[in-house]
Image (cartoon, coloured by chain):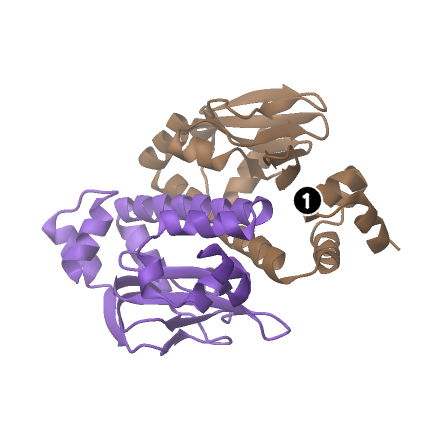
Chain colours: A purple, B brown
Amino acid sequence: MSKELRQHIEEIIPLTDKDFSYILSHFTEKKLKKHQYLIQIGDKVAHTYWVSNGLLKATYTDEKEKEHIIQFAMENWWITDYQAYFTQTKAILNVDCLEATELLCLSYENREKLCKELHKMEHFFRRKANNGFIALQKRMLSFMTNSSETRYDLLLKQYPTLFQRVSKSIIAAYLGVSRETLSRFNK
Amino acid sequence: MSKELRQHIEEIIPLTDKDFSYILSHFTEKKLKKHQYLIQIGDKVAHTYWVSNGLLKATYTDEKEKEHIIQFAMENWWITDYQAYFTQTKAILNVDCLEATELLCLSYENREKLCKELHKMEHFFRRKANNGFIALQKRMLSFMTNSSETRYDLLLKQYPTLFQRVSKSIIAAYLGVSRETLSRFNK
């Protein structure tokens, strides 16, 4: 899985073999089964995770016990409870596996260490943060201004493979509509 | 206004006089009157802006010509159309002044230059990007899960001064409710 991580980082910055082997030494591996939790509400969130293989969702549970899907993550994506991770507070989200999943884990300390020691890794993570902000803003704009049917069409267009990998009720929870409403969009 | 910018940057990284004077040389000043536009939909977005004095809003206009407020910015905040700025595409947002405003402007080229030349500035902007992501995710979670009345209470608690500076119809546009609905919350 390390080859893919290297490719992923090199989309933004060039790396020597020595750079990459040093960077990789700061990650640990983790394997989870389908339905297993990576993060549960109230956990200390020590790591951010890069998905080598598999599919996860991050969800927020509201006062009425309703689940809202904040983010999916599949191959080459990063996932964690960012608020808890960046501010070193307890998790407010659950993150669980929709498929058997293989991850590379980077602790907060090691991420800060890499950013401090290697200017180009600080650049990499700044660029990733900027891209993440744009993606989240797009999602919020879409949430504020588009109908659920339009958001369904956009999701289908943006992540066609997602629809083959998750159930309809998961798609409904991401869009914030009922399973019944979703079935109307499918026609 | 440069003293406040230095304080703002030094909340995250220490600066020598020489550092700061070099950093400041990459900014230009801009003054706008109340109601003036900083960015209009379709503009090339060459700069990000740090607010020295004043108040602005960034808005998205939907297909029905309804305005949605994406972000406010007041003293010590940064504002631009981030999607357009980071991806060097045309503006999809309007940014205009709710008060007479003084700004320090940083071009995309100068921001990248500073990040490349001064590792600590890359660190500063990475930290700002991470904080921005968390703030936006909080807003989206609130939008997905809270009633408009709860969101009103949270906004009042988070930014009490904002309510003295903008009209009720602006607050309504930020919360995504009608002016009539908002007036019920005020009681």
Residue farthest to the right, as pictured: B187
Quarter of the N terminus of chain B within the rendering:
top right
Residue drawn at (50%, 45%) of the image: A137
Image quadrant in which you'd find residue B146 = bottom right
The image position of residue A119, as x and y in percent, is 28, 45
**Viewer-proximal residue, B40 or B107?**
B40
Which amino acid, by three-letter code, is at mark 1? Answer: Tyr
Residue B78 vs A10, above or below: the answer is above
Residue drawn at (31%, 62%) of the image: A164
Residue drawn at (17%, 63%) of the image: A1
Asked whether residue B132 is in view, the answer is: no
The image position of residue B115, as x and y in percent, is 36, 36
Residue behind mark 1 = B174
**Viewer-proximal residue, B153 or B4?**
B153
The image position of residue B144, as x and y in percent, is 59, 58
Asked whether residue B88 is in view, the answer is: yes
Residue drawn at (85%, 53%) of the image: B184
Circle 1 crowding by C-alpha within 10 Å: few under 14, some 14–19, many from 20: many
Q: Find numbered disc 1 in the image and state the secondary structure of the residue it sits on.
A: helix
Q: Chain of mark 1?
A: B
